[in-house]
Amino acid sequence: MKHTKQPIDVDALLERLDKLEQRVAELEQLCAAKDKRIEELEGELDRYKKNSLNSSRPPSSDGPDVPKSSKKSSRKKRKQGAQKGHEPHLRAIFPPEKVNDDFDYHPDQCAHCHSVNVKSSGTAPRIHQTCDLPPIHPHVIEHRLHSVICGECGGETVAALPDDAAGSPFGPGVVAAVGVLTGILHLSKRRAQMAMEELFNIPISLGGLSGCEKRITQALEAPAEEVGDYIREQEIAHADETSWRRGNNVKGWLWTFVTPAAAFFMIHAKRSRKAAETLLGNFSGILVVDRWNAYRIHDDLWQACWAHLKRDFTAISERRGEAGRIGKRLLEKESELFSYWHKVRDGTMSRKTLQRKVALLKYDMKMLLEQGVICENKKTEGTCKELLKVFNSLLTFVYHEGVEPTNNTAGRAVRPGVLWRKGSFGTQSERGARYVERTLTVYGTCQRQGRSAIHYIRDLYQAYSQNQPLPSLLPYQAFVAQKG
């Protein structure tokens, strides 16, 4: 039986095709809506996923599920203590002029055969020193103020205290000790009071401690400002800020301005452009900072911190799709850049070679950031747009010697202030804020110059109480140049 071919109903097929195309369009629209919702939900979860590797959070805030950085995890786990081949760091012995008592010991027989027929070997003796602290007793000076009666009017006149004794029952040593205990070691006033009494046998009230802090604050006004002015005249400096609690839980900010030889601190009510202007003043050198907008007042050369950049790239790499791919590629470029930089720092690559290698790397990074702007991930788009705006400031360190690629210098400088904030209630008054600023300035500056902070505060207060010229916190060369 012969089958006849059925005619094709073209209209029906076209109608069905239209319905299928309509359904595909609806499904595509539904998928796009779901993708957008997924992205929104992932964005809401970002704050739970943030850690020290992909944000500015400190490592101390990381949970147990946060992986260690690749640099640390790639290392072989070592035992605690000194490692094999470790160069010993022996305690330096005191020179002869600082030895109070000394004793010589001579063996009277051989340790091997016990013979008494022994003589000196002629070699230098082995030295063993025992260092101890004797009980500390305060040096008390008593001032007796006698009075006389006038033979003419009968009036009584009492002798006046000398200038260096007037106004305070505590001398420079006590004032300096209080400055170290509360301003550098960040002890609470009650713990500092206990330390003064237990260690130094000096009874002092909480009001007496506060009075010592007041005198230190007053004496440090000019030297601290001098440090700020010195840093503003340098060619390269670092700046950073961290939160600070002020009276009645009002939030403020602790700012720092740092060079290799000095550190200046400032507490301000705001984290604003005005506060940055106050900190930077007339500084016209190269500024190394994070990308906080307040620093954009500095129109000259500046360097964006690559420690922050790496965390941003890590955050992008952890996202889905095209954004994640771009983030991983940016991290690869960051790793390549720093492999070159470490060779320059170690002296195995010249700066000209670095600049030549970075030329192509720079092009690749800019292209990746431009791809990030159109990758349909809002957070990635925003980060990449911001980085493209400041792109020329990402590689300042490549072309200017002495500029560091990270702002770790300022981060380390502000760390004592962070620890002070965490262990206290902040400051309750303007004087308290000035005390924090100025003692942190002393500590940070003395530390960079290898000077003793307690010796400086002692000398400072002694000069201040006697109306003598105050010792400078500036590096010696800068101080000599300033004095002409």
Image (cartoon, rainbow, N blue to C red):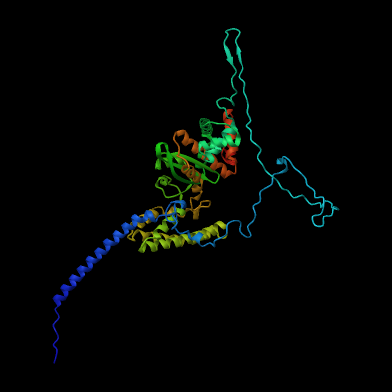
Q: Nearer the viewer, residue 354 or 374?
A: 374
Name of the residue lying farthest toward the front: 114
* Residue at the extreme right of the image, as rendered: 117
Is 343 left, or right, of 377 in this rendering?
A: right
* Any part of residue 60 in sight: yes
Residue positioned most to the bottom: 1
Which is more toward the observer, 31 or 377? Answer: 31
Looking at the image, can residue 226 be seen? Answer: no
Which corner quadrant of the image does residue 271 belong to?
top left
Q: Quadrant of residue 136?
A: top right
Point 63% across, 28% down: residue: 140
State which quarter of the image contains the N terminus: bottom left
Which residue is painted at 46% across and 51% down in the image? 60
Q: Position of residue 138 (x, y in %)?
A: 62, 32
Q: Please state, as top left, top right, bottom left or bottom right, where the C terminus lies in the image.
A: top right
Above or below 403: residue 329: below
Q: Which residue shows up at 54% across the image and 37% down it?
A: 192
- Residue 100 position within the rendered picture, expressed as x and y whole percent measured from the top left: 72, 39
Residue 472 percent coordinates (x, y): 57, 36
Q: Position of residue 231 (x, y in %)?
A: 51, 42
